[in-house]
Amino acid sequence: MNDRIYRILLFAAALVMPLVCGGVVYALVTDAREAFEHFGFFNFLTSSEWSYTEGAEQYGALPFITGTLMTTLLALIFCIPFSLPVALFVGEYFKGTRVAAILSTITDLLAGIPSIIYGLWGFYTLRPLIIMLDISPQGSGVLIASLVLAIMIVPYAASLSAEFIKMVPNDLKEAAYSLGATRAEVIRRVVFPVAGSGIFSAYILAIGRALGETMTVTMLIGNTNNIPNSITSTGNSMASIIANQFGEADDLRLSSLIAIGLILYLITAVINMIGKIMIKRARIV
Amino acid sequence: MESVIPILEFKKTCVSYTKQTMAVKYVSAAIDRNTITAIMGPSGCGKSTLLRAVNLMHSLYPNIRVDGEILLGGENILSMEPIDVRRRVGMVFQRPAPFPTMSIYDNVLSGYVLNGIRLSKAEKDATVERCLRSVALWDEVKEVLNKKGTFLSGGQQQRLCIARALAMQPDVLLMDEPTSALDPIATAHIEELMQELQKEVTILIVTHNMGQAMRISSKSMFMYLGELVEYGDTAAMFSNPSDERTKAYLTGKMG
Amino acid sequence: MDNANIKNRLTKDRIVLYAVSLFAGLMAVPLLAILGEVLLRGYEQLSWSFFTEPTPTAYRAMKAIKAGEPIPGGIANGIVGTMLMLAMAALFAVPIGILCGVFLAENPKNRFSQFVSFLTDLLQGTPSVIIGIVVYIWVVVPMKGYSAIAGSVALSIMMLPLIIRSTEETLRILPASLKEAGLALGGNRARVMLRVQLPAAFGGIFTGVLLAVSRVIGETAPLMFTALGCSFIRFAVDKPISAVPLLIWEFFNDPNLQELIWGASLFLLLFVLTLNLTAKYLAKKWNQ
């Protein structure tokens, strides 16, 4: 093969990426326009009405934006007490040992389970438990969706955090030990501060995953189009309203759903970019 | 009575990384208070391993075994709590390692923070000044105490690490080739400093720079293949080594 | 006083260690619970016909339930659909992804390739439901109907960034001497890449492809708006088609078919996890 053809071929393949990404934005923007023009961009974001009675159609994204932010935030809160120990277990306490490898395999497998199966497990196992414990009468809702979401993002947050914890130079840890510190003190005073920005970016990327997670939330959140007023109440996230209604929607409702998709896309894109940039910085230090 | 007990004494000290191989073999030696003792030998002779045993650094790694006895002021450290021993035995490492997330001020006090000891503001200020003065760094950094320690030059960083170790007021200071990563001027600075420091602390230094051993130490150990071959007055050892292997090393025929 | 302080700190140190181990170990609970539930409830349904027959209609299922018989039929339509769409998706994503990865590895400092690299990250983080919407707009609307093609476009877009990254990273960690030796022997860049670097990187790239397949095989949301689903076995690429995760979603929503959920889930789960473990195992083996 000639060098020129080789280069052109590679360039052509690389060109696919801008085309695809540009196409994504273009498609979303064009088809979301109708909704934004009809309701006004700001109004669409802040309206909490979602009614499709013919002639008096009214669509607003606020309940779903709230639902997404609530499930994501709660998932993050539930995730930290498990992902941080996993990261410390794998990256510090049992670094390089067999038990650490076993735990890594466990979290890898958890990361591989399709989200629809998490949804089933939440629905058939966790939901009855929540009803039995009298936490909420119907079981479904923001709480259970966040719980399962938390389990789903633990592997991402943990494996990336562990990577940064492993990178803390042994010199520094030994220096701290030589001053008489216990392991817990070394972790608190040296490992966490030094690996801090990396760990932080790991959680940003975990948030990015939780924001767009669709099937689990759709199966568990209860699918009501209201703003959830407590963590046990039902609701819908941006992804779940799309999953629920996209197939049956047309015209203005379809455009409104695509508009919600565009908002979701922009939020995840911003979060992911922040995470990626922070990770790159953390790796250099 | 107390002067009779050496500050540090090795009694048949052995260190092994695996069951088959011993890195340090039956070392016995007594070290007097307020002296500088140099440990020399070709690389891989076990000199760093012996030094790290005094600080119980080996207990961080479960597969390393230390046998025999190491007496600190007459007490066997191998049966003491590592965190207690390490507070009384400071250590300075080959590469300067100030904590990158802490200021110069906090680096000096890091031993207290790590040990969970609270000091008043006045005590903190006094400790920082005293320790930085004793490593002759005070005048250079007193204006930038809130800057990160990593902004300093290599020699300054290493002096900061010495100050950090001194802040805990240890009985013994271990130095593991503390100048090997530094330029000659910074090295001279630190050697000068050590002469001053031996008034308050007993220093054990690993070096493979024979000139350095001769300049700073009153006693020297020569180790080879894990054994302590010779231990005595530095001047006597350099002028008239009693063992062939020491002689070979000192004349540059080995390592 | 001093001794009490040391004891106190050592106790705290112990407690932290135990708490870390306990909470980390707790992550085994959801894994075992999910595997256990799917295995125990699913294995009864696995039979030869489960893999060879398509989904029964709700009416047939209802009749069987009323008669107290097991629900007839299986998930063959889903398996065929999944395989067909995966194959088509791979046909597009694997070559383009590898070429694009080679481009990024060959021009690391180039402005354009940094832009492409940024877009790869962006696409990788895009929620799959968004990909579903976009492919609906791109393919389903112009073709005036759901189709296997639309489904495979969605899957291939999700595979693309994973394949690009694994190709690029594998090529990057190859020793530079390999390329230099090839060039020194007089090969041009294309030939050195094709004959020396790519064969050396084969293991890593193959692992990347396996992982990409295992990532998209369980995707449901994007297929809901593109492939839609179909209750019989079909090989047409321009017609709606089923997939295993789509069937699970269908069974979840249809009270008459709920019994079939667990068999389908067991199949999907075993498939995904086997792929996953194989990929990790191969990666380890090739790395040595």
Image (tube, grey):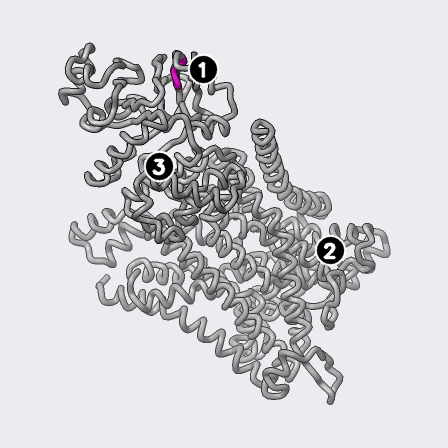
Q: Position of residue A159 (x, y in %)?
A: 51, 48
Residue tagged by mark 3?
A: B162
Secondary structure that dominates the magenta span: loop
Q: Mark 2: which amino acid?
A: Phe
Element under disc 3: helix
Whether residue C96 is situated above or below residue A172 in the rendered picture: below
Residue tagged by mark 1?
A: B74
Residue tagged by mark 2?
A: A123
Which residue range is magenta in the image?
Answer: B5-9
Identify the residue shown where x is 40% and y is 31%: B90
Quadrant of the rendering where the N terminus of chain B is positioned: top left
Whether residue A226 is situated above or below residue C170 in the rendered picture: below
Do discs 1 and 3 share a chain? yes
For marks 1 and 3 on the same chain, the one whose residue lies earlier in the sequence: 1
Specify whether B81 is left or right of C253: left
Q: Position of residue A148 (x, y in %)?
A: 66, 54
> Which one is nearer the viewer's eye here, C268 or A184?
A184
Element under disc 2: helix
Whether residue C208 is situated above or below residue C25 in the rendered picture: below
Element under disc 1: loop
Identify the residue shown where x is 69% and y is 73%: A63
Q: Position of residue C24 (x, y in %)?
A: 60, 41
Q: Position of residue A194 (x, y in %)?
A: 45, 48
Packing grade of label 2 (10 A; few <14, some 14-19, many >=20) is many
Q: Chain of mark 1?
A: B
